[in-house]
Amino acid sequence: MAVIQESGVDHYLVYFTSARQISTENRTTKQKREYGGRGRVMNFTLYLLSWRHQETLLVPLHWSKLRGTALCPRRTSPAQAVNTTLQLKELREQMLPRNIAAYIIPGTDAHLSEYIAPRDNRVAFMTGFTGSAGTAVVTKTKATLWTDSRYWVQAERQMDCNWELEKDVSIRSIAEWLITEVPPGGTIGFDPFLFSLQTQENYHISLESSNRTLMSIPDNLVDRVWKDRPNIPPDHLTRLPDRVIRLFNLRGNDIPYNPFFYSYTLLTMDHIWLFLHTDRVTEELKQYLNASCVGSLCVQLKNYDTVRDDLKNYVANPGVKVWIGTEYTNYALYELITPEEKLMTSSYSPVLTSKAVKDETEERILRDAHVRDAVAVMQLLMWLEKAVPQGKETELTAAEYVNQCRSKQKDSRGPSFETISASGPNAASCPLQPN
């Protein structure tokens, strides 16, 4: 293998020979630079050279296909890549005593949220990839990420050579890979808090005839090696005006750009149990929730981490039946509701179905909010027409400007997600957030 050094970037020419030995030294400097220069389109490209009938066959091969092989040494990782060697080593050490051949890491949280807090972004911690959609799988010798086409460019930039990229998001694709990489009789671990009922069922169906077993492990293995995992925001929860009717009418900021807080509720005819981080509830909120009594209209505050134990104890009572919404109930709670006669299901909980029906006031508020946001976007477009030709603005300053415009609108509480701002070569990365 020959290495051509140009402008501080290593370009590798990998070749196989048959009739006669090929030497890259016989290439002209111009040809060498052409081969290396093409690689810059995606940071780094490998070329396979073979000699057939006195002709050289040049086959470009993207370097990501050789991740984790001897042809992809550590120094070939993109400049933006995060070194994941240590976390992979420590995760595999956690897998070893549990006799797990593979461990699945979904890109969601215990409430199956689309947008998650930094402390729940286990995929980013393990892979370096910060996109909002992806599933990672780690075996004893390999590590692979699955994501959709919005994030292929971003993933290539952010992942180091420990990781391979699969350009797919289907559970079937992951299961097929697992069958290939995990030997028959092997065990595949997962955190049931991060699996929906449908996700667990899809994996089970895909793997059931392959002699590979899924193992539910409620103690997340990534969390055990994530030493500087971000904490939950310490801010107190807040209460909205009574005109907005929901089950408790409470809001938090556990997830950026979303007014949510981590919680579960078990509502019975006689009790209301609210599982949350109790240190964030003020005395005023306790009074509002009637938290000091035990009647049917009193909200009993319980620690967030005890939800499995309390649910298990409740289900053990004779004559109980538990109604869950299957779309947003995680498998960690579902697997406790046994026997099946004690379970009643619907796609969504009655709280969500009532929330989906808007009254006239809510409809008017939604329309007004869209009008105000449209004004901010028009202000951005007018500013861009004047500012861009001067050549001084960037993706970041554009994002800051539109956020400033929105913040000046009536009732603004901040953006609903981080502003996506991309131009030029970054425009191929659809959900790019500038930094």
Image: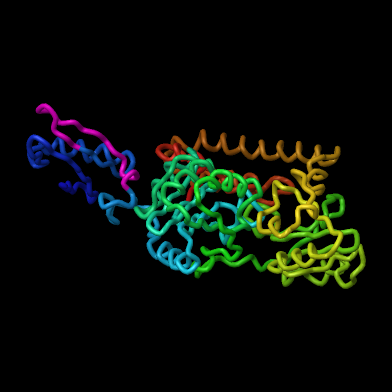
Q: Residue at x 48, y 52 (%)?
A: 136
Q: What main secondary structure does the magenta stretch of the protein show?
A: strand
* 206 in magenta: no
Q: Residue at x 9, y 28 (%)?
A: 54
* Res 336 seen here: yes
* 59 in magenta: yes
Q: Which residues are magenta?
A: 49-66
Q: Is residue 405 above or below residue 31?
A: below
Q: Residue 171 placed where, x, y %?
A: 54, 43
Q: How is the image coloured?
A: rainbow
Q: Residue 280 placed where, x, y %?
A: 72, 69
Q: Quadrant of residue 365?
A: top right
Closest to the observer, 333 or 340: 340
> Does residue 333 appear left or right of residue 155 in this picture?
right
Q: Is residue 189 above or below residue 164?
A: below
Closest to the observer, 393 or 365: 365
* Res 404 seen here: no
